[in-house]
Amino acid sequence: MKQLILFALIFASLVLSADPPKPTYSNKYHTEFIFSLPYAGLNEPYVVDFDETKSRENINIYNGLVRNLYLYDATNDARYEIIITQDKQSCFKNPVDHLTPPKEAKSLTPVIPDLTDWTYTGAKVRRGIQCNYWSYQDTQYNTTSYYEFYAEVNSNQPVQYWMTGVDVVFGSHYDEYILDYYVFQDKTVDESAFVVPDVCKKPETEIPHVFGRNVVQFKNLFPKSTNKKANSRFDRFMSQFGKKYDSREEYLSRKNIFENNMKKIEEHNSQNKGYSMKMNKYADLSFDEFRSLYLLPTIDAEKHEQLSQNLWEPETLYSLPETFDWRKYGAVSPIKDQATCGSCYAFSVIGALEGQHFLSHGKLLEFSEQNVIDCMWNAPHKSWGCDGSEQWKVFDGLMNLGGIMSEEDYPYLGVTGYCGFDKTKKAATIHSYYNVSNDEQIVMQALYQMGPLAVSYDVVSSNVYYSGGYYEDDTCSKTSLNHAVLMVGWGNYQGDPTKPYWLIKNSWSTHWGDEGYMYISRKNNDCGFTSQVTYPILNRD
């Protein structure tokens, strides 16, 4: 009898200490969740119907502001995206056999991770719900990525997915993502989600558009189930950043791009050229792909007649200090993140407006980039929302609109929405704007006298991986410009007069460059930083 009791106690102990079974989910489900990027200040509501059994998926963002519909069946074999253009819906149809690279053809985007290689870690409460959670981590190139997935203890319903990466050398974060699931229905979808809407029967053909900007962020969000025998640098890169590819063809293509990028980074860092480069999550993208997602259509400054109009001319040339930085005076707001919206022009414009407000009112007020993205479609010089514009067009458009709202009243979404400008809540109005001639001394005086300047430059591949130091690259153009930023200062790098720089504020978060800033050579108009320089003048309301 004692032996039986002892056996029963041991058995009960084993049962109680056994890990709960891993949640498994089908390849067909309906889910609703909030996707959060804490360091960008974004909280995006999603509704997703995922049906791999029929090669179809519907992704609805911000209650219909953006909708991605994938229908890879014999009838459609196409993907659609519906966005807002000022005050109406516009639909874009991208047939996969024409506009989509073959390696990405018919690719759906799951929003639940594969837990095959994850480890049960324990129980925690998330959003007031008792959960079991599983974790996964990977360390490569001095960087550790952490992943956690929380499921309700009894039903295994998804509750939260969390991912971050921490540099184990410096202890700094580089990214954090959170998915909070509020609805999950396995093995079922909303059939109405797959009906092609009427607006897509006559899709847009004139508006330039990059398909699926917001969907691309999910492609690499979840770690891929790993091959324990894999030991190549590319396999480790895939594991670290959760890369997943849909075919051997795509795997080999991405591997080739990765190896070329890694070679360039290693060769550069071995030459002690004055600035450093670092591998990041873009390492399997060609520069053309990066450009289509994050940069603007190229502007030819040499043929740009508008740049010779409204020219600012200083009455007197000052004797200027060797170093100057508007950040020290409080005229520059914190670094922001444009996410996967091609809205760099809006951040450049808003930075210049914020500087002007500081000069005229003595205090910093953050204005709304989203106001710019949403409300310039009907302006005299049309802008394209998340697909780009130029700063002078926006200044002109804001004059026509009647003002700009604050970031607090009109927060950033990272997608194009309906124009929500409210004149009763305008924070400032624009009187005029000026261009600055392509002359280093005049640009310096304009920066010193008139405040932070909206500028553009030519991003080349080395700039994508810039991580600090004095940036020079003779392959970039002085006239073909594809990215908009804010010029906030100048100086000599580390006091060396042979290294004069412009201090540039970017909109790619603090995880890029030197905490979001760049020290770019100002020799010979490197990369075109003085080719398109603009600033606004506010009304003294």
Image (spheres, rainbow, N blue to C red):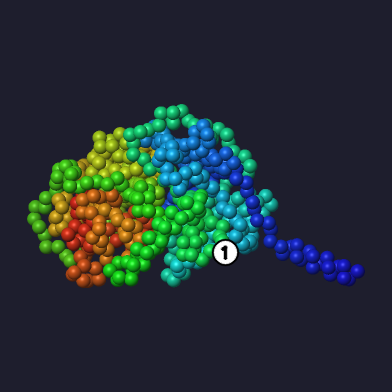
Image mark count: 1
Q: Nearer the viewer, residue 462 or 471?
A: 462
Decide: few, some or many residues near mark 1? Use Cα within 10 Å; few <14, some 14-19, many ≥20: few
Location of the C terminus by quadrant is: top left
Location of the N terminus by quadrant is: bottom right
In the visual, does 420 lie left or right of 352? right
List the single residue furthest toward the left.
Answer: 316
- Percent position (x, y) of residue 266? 36, 67
Above or below for 54 versus 286: above
**Residue 88 falls in which quadrant of the image?**
top left
Q: Nearer the viewer, residue 127 or 531?
A: 531
In the visual, does 472 lie left or right of 267? left
Amino acid residing under circle 1 = Lys
Q: Residue at x 32, y 36 (%)?
A: 377
Q: Which residue is mark 1?
A: 228
Q: Nearer the viewer, residue 534 or 299?
A: 299
- Percent position (x, y) of residue 456? 25, 51
Instruction: Say whether residue 391 is visible.
Output: no
Instruction: Say whether residue 105 is visible.
Output: yes
Q: Residue at x 41, y 28 (%)?
A: 202
Check disc 1 and report its element: helix, strand or loop.
Answer: loop
Q: Residue at x 29, y 43 (%)?
A: 389
- Percent position (x, y) of residue 287? 35, 53
Q: Residue at x 49, y 33 (%)?
A: 76
List the single residue furthest toward the right.
Answer: 1
Above or below for 479 versus 517: above
In the visual, does 284 lie left or right of 128? left
- Percent position (x, y) of residue 208? 34, 39
